[in-house]
Image: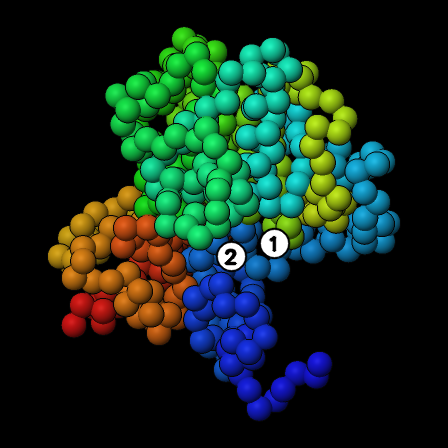
Amino acid sequence: MAQSLANSVFEEDKQFIAPLYGKANIEFVRGEGSYLFDKNGKKYLDFVAGIAVNALGHQNAAIKKAVEEQMDSFFHISNLYPNFPQVNLAKALLAATGFDKAFFCNSGTEANEGCIKFARKYFDRKGEKNRQKIVTFINSFHGRTFAALSATGQPAIREGFGSMPGDFVHVPWNDVAALKAEVNNDTCAIMLESLAAEGGVMTVSDEMVAAINSLKKEFGCLVIVDEVQAGMGRLGTFLGLQKHGIDADLVSLAKALGGGLPLGAVLLRQKVADQLKAGDHGTTFGGNPVACAVGLAVVNQIAKPEFLANVEARSAQLKAGLEAIAAKFPAVKGVRGEGLILGLALDESLPVGNVIAAARDEGMMVLSAKGNVLRLLPPLNVSAAECDEALAKLDAAFATATK
């Protein structure tokens, strides 16, 4: 169908695309570094980064080169045959994380499905078929497919889809007593995000980490860490669990890993991999060679110590500026987050959507999290000057939104 010149992309989207997203009426035509440009030439500082996907910004040269070079070889051959794009990416991920095996898929929800399946298969193969229960957290988010949705601690997004896979239990975030009450000899795994971004930019407490590690040792359950949004350098360490000392057996990755292409991964300890065999799980497109070539280009940049040091420096800079904004505007209740997942918790007098719209008018893209929280997800290679610009734009947006 020919593109209509009379209608905007917003109008045509409403006509042809399923109505599953609340989209802004804006048409972007180009990205460059930390910026997006709309059809009228207006420039926007992008602190959404494709919801933490564009960790290296737009038009990253190494990503473009990786795509071009791999497309000169082959686009896709399936997982019936080994290929070096997968192997090379796996080697880089394992070197950066200390895990033993990798499985590739297409997305974060697929990665979490893989973690759940591998955890249950692990105990099944060991003859401990009673171990089915997976303990997760209220307001967590692990994806939209059925098992990942069951693990997600948000009942509203499960409504209307019928029966969910069973044996998932949700406890309050950072509630050590509630967690201890649920973990026992029938527990398969404890599953958590290294930072609960969608659920409100909630940081895991030291006490919760200690409890998780202790319960794993006491009961022999597995620990699954969802690093889909908080991993890949976003907390200032390659994995968020490295920052907090979480003793994980399975890790899910996606978003930034593919640099804008669909790519997810599960990282496994050897003991889990030893209980798996051909046919236990699979995917047609998972680990696509072009996506894996891009993934290697991403990992090679993010894993550098100086790159991660920039994440920490920019985090400190932004936190200081956000604290000043919080002190200036009474509707801001506090600053949340770590690394370059940062949030401002707002009281009910100031809907977060009003601030998002005001920031867009100022030429800055930001997004929300659960609980009326303004969320910032800048590219990880954002500069100090761009962070100063972001803080100035946010200050102006709050001034407008609180008039």
Whether residue 403 can be seen here: yes
Q: On the rendered image, what quadrant is the C terminus found in?
A: bottom left
Q: Which mark is residue 129?
A: none
Q: Nearer the viewer, residue 263 or 109?
A: 109
Q: Which mark is residue 260?
A: 1
Q: Is 28 displayed left or right of 85 in the figure?
A: left
Q: Position of residue 308 (x, y in %)?
A: 48, 38
| Residue holding disc 2 | 50
Q: Position of residue 48 (x, y in %)?
A: 44, 57
Kindly identify the residue that appears in the image at 81 percent across and 51 percent down. 75
Q: Disc 1, disc 2: CB below 8 Å?
A: yes
Mark with earlier residue (1, 2):
2
Q: Is 373 displayed left or right of 96 in the figure?
A: left
Up-down relation of residue 311 to residue 322 (above or below): above
Q: Position of residue 287 (x, y in %)?
A: 72, 41
Q: Position of residue 384 (x, y in %)?
A: 40, 52
Up-down relation of residue 73 to residue 401 (above or below): above
Q: Nearer the viewer, residue 146 or 300?
A: 146
Q: Give the amino acid at mark 1.
A: Gly
